[in-house]
Image (cartoon, helix red, strand yellow):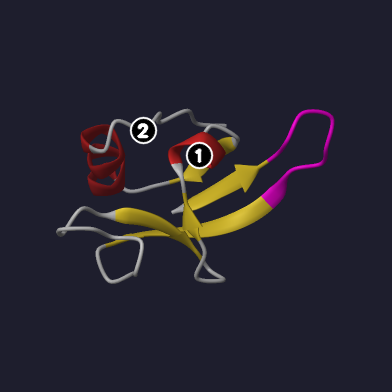
């Protein structure tokens, strides 16, 4: 999926995000969000992301993880 990350009063940065269980931050098969740089995104950081594009399956996965699905 594609997102934009922006802290208040800063220009947004485009990000490619993957939902995966193949990352060290994944525990007991629970999926995590990972940037193109391999960094896991915690729920607090996710609050500063806005979805640019995502598949219906990715939206379902985000909701199952209890994460917002705010679109631009």
Neighbours of disc 1 within 10 Å: few (<14), some (14-19), many (20+): some
**2 sits to left or right of 69:** right
Q: Which residues are magenta?
A: 6-13
Q: Which residue is mark 2?
A: 67
The x and y percentages for residue 2 are 51, 52
State the residue at coordinates (29%, 30%).
Answer: 66
Residue 46's mark? Answer: 1
Residue 18 pos. (x, y %): 39, 61
Residue in the foreground of this view, choosing between 44 and 7: 44
Q: Is residue 4 left or right of residue 9?
A: left
Q: Is residue 11 above or below residue 22?
A: above
In this rendering, position of residue 5 left or right of residue 47: right
Which residue is at a point 50% across and 31% down the rendered structure image?
71
Of the two numbered discs 2 and 1 on the same chain, state the one appearing first in sequence.
Answer: 1
Q: CA distance from mark 2 to mark 1?
A: 8 Å
Find out whether the residues at labels 2 and 1 contact each other: C-beta distance under 8 Å.
yes
């Amino acid at each position: 999926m594609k997102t934009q990350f922006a802290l208040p009063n800063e220009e947004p940065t485009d990000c490619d995000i993957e939902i995966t269980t193949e990352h060290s931050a994944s525990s007991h098969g629970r999926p995590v969000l990972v940037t193109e740089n391999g960094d896991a995104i915690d729920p607090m950081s996710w609050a500063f992301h806005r979805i640019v594009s995502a598949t219906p399956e990715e939206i379902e996965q985000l909701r199952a993880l209890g994460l917002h699905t705010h679109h631009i």
